[in-house]
Image (cartoon, rainbow, N blue to C red):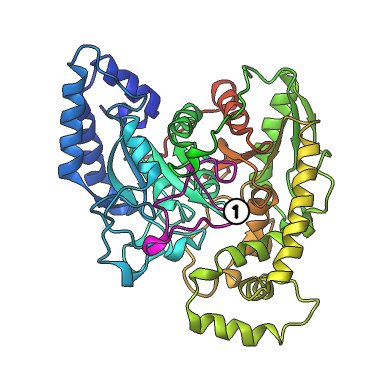
Amino acid sequence: MSDIAFLPANKLARLIRARKIGCLELLEHCLERVRRHNPKLNAIIVKRLPAARKAARDADALLRKRGAKIGPLHGVPMTVKESFDVAGLPTTWGLTEFKLHRAKTHALAVERLIAAGANVFGKTNVPVMLADWQTFNPVYGTTNNPWDVARTPGGSSGGAAAALAAGLTGLEYGSDIGASIRNPAHYCGVYGHKPSYQIVSPRGHGLAGMVSFADIAAVGPLARSAVDLEIALRATAGPDPIDGAGWKLALGSRGWRSPRGLRVAVMLTHPTAEVDESVQAPIHALARFLAKSGAKVSERARPAFDPHEAHLVFIQLLRFATAGRQPDAQYLRFEQEKHSLAPEDNGYYAQFVRGNTMAPRDWARLNERRHQMRLAWAAFFREWDVLLCPTAATAAFPHMQTGERWERMLDVNGKPQPSTTQMFWAGYSGMCFLPSTVAPVGLTKEGLPVGVQIVGAQYADFATIRFAQIIEREYRAFVAPPGY
């Protein structure tokens, strides 16, 4: 039974349909592993055991009914990020003032996963306000990386990626505005997909019942297989009931089975956010493999705009998108501070302050530039199928919980880099609404996972996922961390 914990969700569902394992049996196996391994990881922080056991028994009973309709995730135990509403469970976003809050209904994505047969048995940890590439908060504490518990699993879907990598859950669902799906997938050696903007409704993924949809943000799956990403995205994508009265989602598909003939652009690093050689090397090795396998590979092809400018635009649009979450006192402080900022100061904190206090006219100017870049991406993807790039500047780094995020330094090729600088790799494609899939492609010399970010054209979600499936099938698949 030890190996079954690391099977992808699609294979677990296949075993269930073949009656080789029962739904309740599989759930109890997951829960036993949670009891054994979660104390040192603190990945799964809330469970709904009576409801999950009943759902498992009901799923077993349904299998015994002739002609019963069985979903693609029937009986698969899974968890979701703490920030999604699950009826009866707390949704805190790591804030103590919401510790007693209980959701009354499921988030729409959770509803759809359950409709596909998944058994949601708990929730995974997040940083405060989902605003860090680490996962710690005063409500639930710190989550550790299963590859090295002295290191972060990433954030903000850090608990999700850690639980998957350690074989504690069969599937996960997270959210991403600044690589919050992509970064933990890279740090923990699992798969993650940030969908094209708004193809999956975030209804029920809002602090204290907020229902408006944030700019740039997306919700999507994490898994131990790129095949699972496709299954979970098909189960959850599409308009909510209100929007569904007026539009339908029609994502294009790609029949790619091998690298031969594919047009692949590769971007290993950039002066704005230098990438450590330990991360560049596995992605470069993948590029060489693709070229030898018949793909057309270029390390020079880029969309026609300045990536550094894109970074400046992204940070300010990002900070404006999350400005509504800040307390009034903080906003007033930023309003005072912005007048003392030097015009030439483009450091992260200066952009943070400007973004949080931006006037509508300034936002409109940046939004116009963003959409010009979006058109440049569209032209680029008429010539290239995907762009491969890093997700972050380094592999998972040791826990750093003191000081502000922009004050915490990473060692990148022997030089200090503010941890917030690597947000470049989140925003380059993310602010233009593009899909990105992260797939594991190797390990550093220290034995830490490295993922590649696969960027595609807007609404080409199944193209980037299919590309990840090619990597999984022909180059490298999920590898479990030692000791689990």
Camera-side residue of 279 and 335: 335
Q: Position of residue 331 (x, y in %)?
A: 55, 80
Quarter containing the C terminus: top left
* Residue 6 on the magenta segment: no
Q: Position of residue 222 (x, y in %)?
A: 46, 40
Residue at screen point 20% across, 34% down: 55
Q: Residues within 10 Å of mark 1 (few under 14, many from 20)?
A: many
Q: Is residue 328 left or right of residue 292?
A: left
Q: Is residue 90 placed above or below 224 in the rendered structure?
A: below
> Which is nearer the eye, 449 or 23?
23
Amino acid bearing label 1 = Ile
Residue, disc 1: 216
Residue shown at 29%/49% (left/top)?
38
Magenta-drawn segment: 195-220
How far from the left and from the top, in percent, is residue 14?
34, 19
Q: Is residue 131 above or below residue 158?
A: below
Image spot of residue 65 (x, y percent): 18, 15
